[in-house]
């Protein structure tokens, strides 16, 4: 059995998959990937199920070394420099590490999370049907915690399949869409207008449980406590200090702060990829618009296998290139003799 050994990795990196849907009613946190499209894309590249477990890599760099045989991988999500033994690797492509070779990833340049899928998946013991890590709950496999240097991910040997790339739509540079509620009646029109009209930033103190927003204080009409009720990915709670918190996959299953709005599911991954400190805005849409966007998002997920393309490559013969006169009639600016090269017309003479 081959394995991928983690030789270095930053914080906010763990094994994640599609999460534990259907278990929140039992008080079990859902967890799962922050960006489901990127997870599905990287798994599709290596022939895994779309929401199979992969390595979710935070904004810092990482390095992985193949041991015990070749390992085929794919990378998607945040743009960053990547290479295998000095050979560049593009995001949204697959590649194979020979035994002993190391994949090195730089810092994220855009976005916050990258996803590294391994052909054949990651070996582990599912907790409630999932390998997704939730460190606070002690759930996940093969390590129920953030990944560390020295960890080993067991997998199958590389199949030798041809490498591929996947064509994904460009990331929209647009406000994050929300629907009001379910407790928007706890806020006045002025507060909701301030929420929509303001520029927001994600605090550096944010994590997989919640993204704290930096911006104006949003005032409540009747205080900040309500009877606790259920939460979803994107629930936008407003605590007593008026600074909203967007709940993320490792959130609690219920909460007791009023929720002014909810990030629509189609925009949740894009919101999760927003780097700390980058300014953005929200835009309110109707429920019908949110549902239409959700259908379009799921159509995109289902279309991923059709978006695969072969990686076109060619071998460059350096020796032949050196012997070829690729410049044609080249001259030297400091050698006047080279300026008087006879043209074909001079050689053949007049007709």
Image (tube, helix red, strand yellow):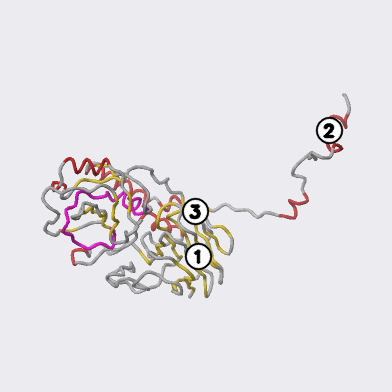
Real-space Cα separation, disc 2 to disc 1, in angstroms: 54 Å
Say which of 99 and 135 sits in front.
135
Q: Which residues are magenta?
A: 248-273
Query: At x 74% / y 44%, what residue is drawn?
Result: 326
Q: On the picture, is 68 further left or further right than 23? A: right
Front residue (pair 224, 110): 224
Q: Does the stretch in magenta take in 143?
A: no
Indicate whether 259 appears above or below 144: above
Mark 2 is surrounded, within 10 Å at the Cα level, by few (under 14), some (14 to 19) or many (20 or more) other residues, namely: few
Q: Earlier in the sequence, mark 3 or mark 1?
A: 1
Q: Secondary structure at mark 3?
A: strand
- Classify residue 16 as left or right of residue 264: right
Q: Is residue 263 magenta?
A: yes
Q: Which residue is mark 3?
A: 165
Report the residue at 32% width, 59% height from top: 205
Q: What's the CA distance linking mark 3 and mark 1?
A: 13 Å
Quarter of the image where one finds residue 257 = bottom left
Query: What residue is drawn where x is 27% and y is 64%?
Result: 20
Q: Secondary structure at mark 2?
A: helix
Which residue is disc 1 drawn over? 72
- Find disc 2 in the rendering and name its residue: 344
| Of the image marks 2 and 1, the number of the one nearer the N terminus | 1
Query: How many numbered dots are placed on residues in this image?
Result: 3
Q: From what the image shows, is residue 155 above or below residue 59?
A: below
> Height in image: 240 above or below 2?
above
Give the mark, 3 or 2, whose residue is nearer the N terminus.
3
The location of residue 266, given as percent across then percent down, is 31, 49
**Residues packed near mark 3 inside 10 Å, few (<14), some (14 to 19) or many (20 plus):** many
């Amino acid at each position: 059995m081959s394995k991928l050994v983690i030789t270095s990795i930053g914080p906010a990196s763990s094994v994640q998959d599609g999460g534990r849907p259907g278990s929140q009613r039992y008080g079990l946190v859902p967890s799962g990937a922050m960006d489901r499209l990127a997870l599905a894309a990287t798994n599709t590249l290596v022939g895994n199920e779309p929401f199979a477990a992969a390595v979710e890599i935070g904004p810092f760099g990482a390095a992985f070394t193949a041991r015990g045989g070749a390992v085929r991988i794919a990378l998607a999500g945040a743009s960053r420099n990547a290479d295998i033994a000095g050979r560049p690797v593009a995001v949204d492509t697959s590649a194979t590490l020979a035994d002993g070779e190391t994949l090195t990833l730089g810092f994220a340049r855009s976005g916050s999370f990258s996803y590294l899928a391994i052909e054949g998946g990651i070996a582990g013991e599912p907790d409630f049907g999932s390998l997704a890590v939730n460190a606070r709950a002690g759930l996940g496999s093969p390590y129920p915690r953030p990944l560390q240097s020295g960890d080993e991910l067991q997998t199958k040997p590389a199949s030798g399949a041809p490498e591929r790339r996947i064509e994904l739509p460009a990331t929209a540079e647009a406000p994050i869409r929300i629907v009001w509620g379910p407790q928007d009646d706890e806020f006045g029109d002025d507060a909701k207008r301030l929420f929509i009209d303001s520029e927001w930033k994600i605090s550096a103190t944010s994590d997989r449980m919640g993204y704290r927003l930096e911006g104006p204080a949003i005032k409540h009409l009747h205080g900040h406590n309500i009877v606790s009720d259920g939460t979803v990915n994107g629930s936008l709670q407003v605590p007593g200090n008026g600074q909203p918190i967007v709940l993320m996959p490792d959130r609690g299953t219920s909460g007791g702060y009023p929720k002014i709005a909810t990030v629509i599911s189609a925009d949740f991954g894009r919101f999760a990829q927003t780097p700390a400190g980058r300014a953005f805005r929200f835009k309110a849409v109707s429920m019908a618009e949110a549902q239409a966007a959700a259908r379009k998002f799921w159509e995109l997920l289902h279309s991923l296998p059709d978006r695969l393309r072969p990686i076109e490559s060619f071998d460059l013969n350096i020796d032949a290139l050196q012997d070829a006169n690729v410049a044609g009639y080249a001259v030297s600016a400091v050698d006047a003799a080279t300026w008087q090269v006879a043209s074909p017309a001079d050689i053949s003479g007049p007709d």
